[in-house]
Image (cartoon, rainbow, N blue to C red):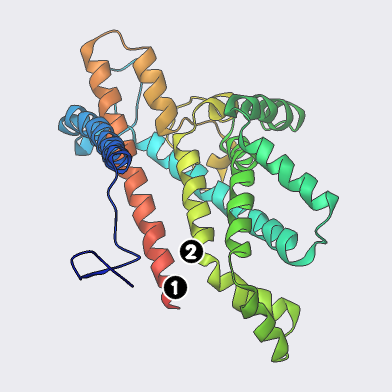
């Protein structure tokens, strides 16, 4: 502490305001306000345009381009849930297991660095490239054709790098003292990883799953090459996996690009509103699951 000329004391930690600090703070608040306004504006515009056209018949009936009276989106909702659930069931254990191996078991050498670099590169590859690969491998070479399963396998490749890298960072963020303490008490390597490291990293892992889920719901290019654009109602729970089906995003794209009258744009806006609501519900469910796992 130092004394001022008036006899008072000056704190070394007293805040000093400079003109540059005020300008920087103004720019930060302005950027935050613009971001919030743009986000609220986009969501509000879609909801205002789409929600008035949502009805029970719109949500519970099928769609037909030849029949103007059949403009429901139930098959597209089912297809979207199919692809989200099946893709997450495939990619989540693979991604988490890969991240655990890279951070807890593998020797940190050139091979691990190469794998990490590869996953970072794959995270930036355009989805249409994955779609072309999925069409060539799954649809043509493996004989799946346009099907839900081909779309799920393609989306697995798309979001696997995101799951691996985000999970890996979450596992690396767990303090080393936790693992050292558990090992000092006689716990084995596997028990430490499964009983100590993995629960501590669970919030970050669920964040990775949420990011992957958002990528699946919003994907269109890769699924256009693999899952197709059929609008048929499912014939069976398992048989539908091998049939073609468009998701809500593909339906939105098809409806908006092929629209010739205002009624078609109303369907597109209503589909976009349902898509936003579905993403919100899925994110809330993931958040509730995260809180349950934290308490557990």
**Residue named by callout 1:** 294
Q: Are marks 2 and 1 in contact (CB under 8 Å)?
A: yes
Q: Secondary structure at mark 2?
A: helix
Residue located farthest toward the top when viewing the structure as drawn:
260
| 281 horizontally vs 133: left or right | left
Residue located farthest toward the front when viewing the structure as drawn:
5
Residue located farthest toward the bottom when viewing the structure as drawn:
185
Classify the position of the C terminus by image quarter: bottom left
Q: How many marks?
A: 2
Disc number at residue 203?
Answer: 2
Q: Residues within 10 Å of mark 2 (few under 14, many from 20)?
A: some
- Residue name at image x 40 percent, y 21 percent: 253
Nearer-N-terminus badge (2/1) = 2
Q: Secondary structure at mark 1?
A: helix
Classify the position of the N terminus by image quarter: bottom left
Q: Quadrant of residue 126?
A: top right
Position above or below: 131 against 241: above
Q: Is residue 213 visible?
A: yes
Work out whether residue 50 or residue 25 is closer to the camera in this orientation and state it.
Answer: 25
| 150 horizontally vs 247: left or right | right
Q: CA distance from mark 2 to mark 1?
A: 8 Å
Work out whether residue 156 or residue 72 is closer to the camera in this orientation and state it.
Answer: 156
Work out whether residue 87 or residue 96 is closer to the camera in this orientation and state it.
Answer: 96
Q: Could you tell me residue 146's position as x and y percent? A: 60, 28
Q: Residues within 10 Å of mark 1 (few under 14, many from 20)?
A: few
Q: Could you tell me residue 234's position as x and y percent? A: 46, 39
Q: Could you tell me residue 121's position as x and y percent? A: 68, 36
| 71 horizontally vs 212: left or right | left
Q: Quadrant of residue 195?
A: bottom right
| 164 horizontally vs 67: left or right | right
- Residue name at image x 37 percent, y 12 percent: 258
Q: Is residue 69 visible?
A: no
């Amino acid at each position: 502490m130092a004394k001022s000329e008036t006899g008072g004391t000056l704190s070394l930690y007293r805040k000093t305001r400079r003109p540059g600090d005020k300008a920087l703070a103004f720019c930060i608040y302005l950027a935050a306000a613009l971001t919030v306004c743009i986000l609220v504006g986009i969501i509000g515009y879609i909801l205002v345009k789409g929600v008035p056209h949502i009805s029970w018949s719109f949500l519970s009936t099928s769609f037909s381009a030849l029949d103007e009276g059949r403009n429901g989106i139930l098959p597209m909702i089912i297809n979207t849930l199919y692809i989200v659930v099946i893709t997450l069931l495939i990619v989540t254990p693979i991604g988490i297991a890969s991240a655990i191996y890279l951070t807890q078991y593998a020797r940190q050498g050139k091979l691990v660095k190469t794998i990490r670099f590869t996953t970072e590169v794959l995270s930036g590859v355009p989805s249409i490239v994955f779609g072309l690969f999925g069409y060539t491998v799954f649809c043509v070479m493996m004989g799946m054709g346009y099907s839900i399963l081909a779309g799920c396998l393609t989306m697995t490749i798309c979001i696997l790098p995101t799951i691996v890298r985000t999970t890996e960072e979450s596992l690396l963020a767990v303090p080393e003292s936790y693992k050292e303490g558990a090992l000092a008490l006689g716990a084995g390597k596997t028990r430490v990883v499964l009983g100590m490291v993995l629960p501590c990293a669970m919030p970050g892992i669920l964040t990775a799953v949420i990011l992957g889920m958002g990528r699946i719901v919003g994907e269109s290019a890769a699924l256009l090459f693999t899952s197709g654009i059929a609008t048929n109602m499912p014939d069976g729970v398992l048989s539908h996996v091998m049939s073609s089906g468009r998701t809500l995003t593909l339906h939105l794209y098809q409806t908006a690009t092929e629209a010739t009258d205002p009624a078609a744009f109303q369907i597109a806006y209503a589909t976009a509103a349902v898509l936003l609501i579905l993403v919100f519900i899925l994110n809330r469910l993931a958040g509730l699951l995260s809180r349950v796992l934290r308490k557990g």
